[in-house]
Image (tube, helix red, strand yellow):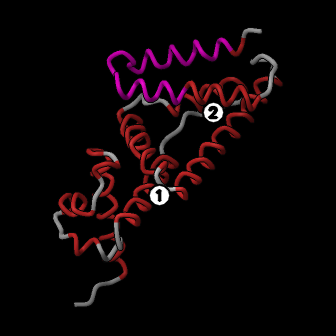
Amino acid sequence: MPRTKGDHEARRRDVSEAVWRVLTAHGFGGLTLRAVAAELGATTGLLTHYFRGKQELLTHALDLLDERTGTRARRAAGPGLAGVRALLLDVLPLSEEAVTGNRIWVSSWDTALADPALSAAYARKYGRSRERLSDLVADAQRRNELRPGDPARIAEGALAFTLGLVVQALFDPRAFPPKRQVELLDDHLNTLVEP
């Protein structure tokens, strides 16, 4: 019996889920065709129908990570300082899902840094995040909720602080549990309120 397009799409979803499980367990360093095949209970030959090689597998994994990050539930941003805080809280590993996503993102950095095209794509992604945060900072300044200053520079500093906190929380979750992460973020935001 010939396979239908629905069969192919269902199998592709199964492959994507296997890729995600390998990423969750082993990060980008452990992402290989062999590991995905084992997770899927299939042969690497089957996977070559979906990925011609490691580079296509990595590209798919990054697309999958971006898609999952984009569809993840977010806090209601609201205007002004509340929006700034909500955006930064959404970056932090405050839930099991956010820990998993952040672990995968951090493990992907080495792969992205080694590939000029991926590195450029990441630079654009982080640039868009800074622009979005800068717009929220400017709104908070118009509402007199944040001190005056260059919104782009304030956004750069706040995002750099938050990403640094992500790394610390991933490496030492006992020292940086969710409550402590929120306290530290609020402490940082308070420094932006005071003149």
Residue under the image location 66 percent in, 45 percent down? 128
* Residue depth check, mark 2 versus mark 1: number of the one nearer the observer: 1
Q: Image check: 38 left or right of 101?
A: left
> What element does badge 2 sit on?
loop
The vertical placement of 34 against 73, above or below, is below
The vertical placement of 78 against 181, above or below, is below
Q: Quadrant of the C terminus?
A: top right
Residue 171, percent across and down? 35, 26
Residue 88, percent across and down? 57, 29
For label 1, the residue is: 63
Q: How crowded is mark 2: few (under 14 residues within 10 Å), some or many (20 or more)?
A: some
Q: Image check: 84 left or right of 64?
A: right
Q: Which amino acid does label 2 sit on?
A: Ala
Residue under the image location 43 percent in, 30 percent down? 93
What kind of secondary structure does the magenta stretch mostly adopt? helix
For label 2, the residue is: 77
- Residue 175 inside the magenta-drawn segment: yes
Q: Image check: 176 left or right of 127?
A: left
Residue 129, percent across and down? 63, 41
**Residue at mark 2 to residue at mark 1: CA–CA distance:** 25 Å
Residue under the image location 73 percent in, 28 percent down? 153
The vertical placement of 46 against 71, above or below, is below
Magenta residues (range): 162-191
Identify the mark at residue 49; answer none if there is no mark: none
Which sits earlier in the primary sequence, circle 2 or circle 1? 1
Residue 65, percent across and down? 44, 51
Residue under the image location 48 percent in, 46 percent down? 69
